[in-house]
Amino acid sequence: MAIVVDPGEHHDLWLALLREQLPDEEFVHPDDDVDPATVQFVISWKHPTERILGYPNLRALLLASAGFDHLDPAVMAAVPVVRLIDPAMADDIALYCLSWVIHFQRDFDRFASDQPTATWSRPAPRFPRDYTVGVLGHGAIGSVVLETCAQHGFRTVGWSRSNHDRSYDEFFEASDVVVNLLPLDESTHHAIAAEELAALGDGVLINVGRGGTVDTGALLAALDGRMRAAVLDVFTTEPLPADDPLWAHPKVTITPHIAGRTDPTTSVPVIVESIVDLRAGRRPAGLVER
């Protein structure tokens, strides 16, 4: 039986690591001449829907990413999906967020704005103990972001639907920086809109969750007003179209969905463990509820 490997990039490294750790398995490229009936698992980031549905004996789709909202609902209904829960990716996202938190806490954005006019300004310092990082959606990754920021002396507050100590608006009001890690579903679409951004005031939004959780029109309006800045790593449409107004806004920093990078060296052992669990009839850690 075969396992199709289609991670999107670094294919040769993925294959080498998988064959090293599961030498008795047959790993194939998606374009190899393989009988679809022999395919039991697909390891992929964005494998075509028609191919996934064309494997009649597929036991699971093993994602090379933490997110799964890009999947066609037909795939979600047809086959078990296992998302990638790689602790190293959580650390990667936490360091991305921490670097931007420090950027604004230390006023580096303001110094950069002063430089073209040769303005020597020294704003009153705000130390980490005076700066609050709010993490929206503090699950497995959010908890690491909270812990990482707290370890560096920042005040932290987390908020999720099942775990919070204040109202939603109060969470935004309390935060100097909000790190958004919400997944995208019907309940979180535009969960950050005009009311929440007004509560954030002159704060900063860092979005490493999903683009659709933020109302872009409301965000642009807030940035035209009091809001200090937005750092955006995820978008409703990716790549972000060249004519999108986010590109040109002076208070927006755009990164191309790189906050949490998939590292085959740390991700392959997690996926291997999922395959072993599935073969043994055990529930893998990242199994998505349907």
Image (cartoon, grey):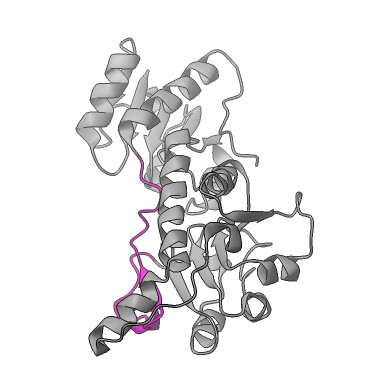
Question: As displayed, is residue 25 above or below residue 189?
Answer: above
Residue 192 point in image, percent of width and height: 62, 71
**Displayed quadrant of residue 194:** bottom right
Residue 132 point in image, percent of width and height: 60, 61
Residue 136 point in image, percent of width and height: 62, 58
255 in magenta: yes
Residue 87 point in image, percent of width and height: 48, 34
- Given residues 190 and 143, the one toward you in this image is 143
Q: Is residue 227 left or right of residue 167?
A: left
152 in magenta: no
Q: Is residue 115 left or right of residue 100?
A: left
Q: Residue at x 34, y 63 (%)?
A: 255
Q: Quadrant of the N terminus?
A: top left
**Displayed quadrant of residue 13:** top left
* Residue 41 in sight from this viewpoint: yes
Which secondary structure is most common in the magenta stretch?
loop
Question: As displayed, is residue 218 above or below residue 210?
Answer: below
Q: Quadrant of the C terminus?
A: top right
Question: As displayed, is residue 58 above or below residue 239?
Answer: above
Q: Residue at x 49, y 89 (%)?
A: 224
Q: Residue at x 47, y 29 (%)?
A: 58
* Residue 32 in sight from this viewpoint: no
- Given residues 32 and 95, the one toward you in this image is 95
Instruction: Look at the image and give the residue range highlighted in magenta.
Output: 238-262
Q: Residue at x 47, y 54 (%)?
A: 70
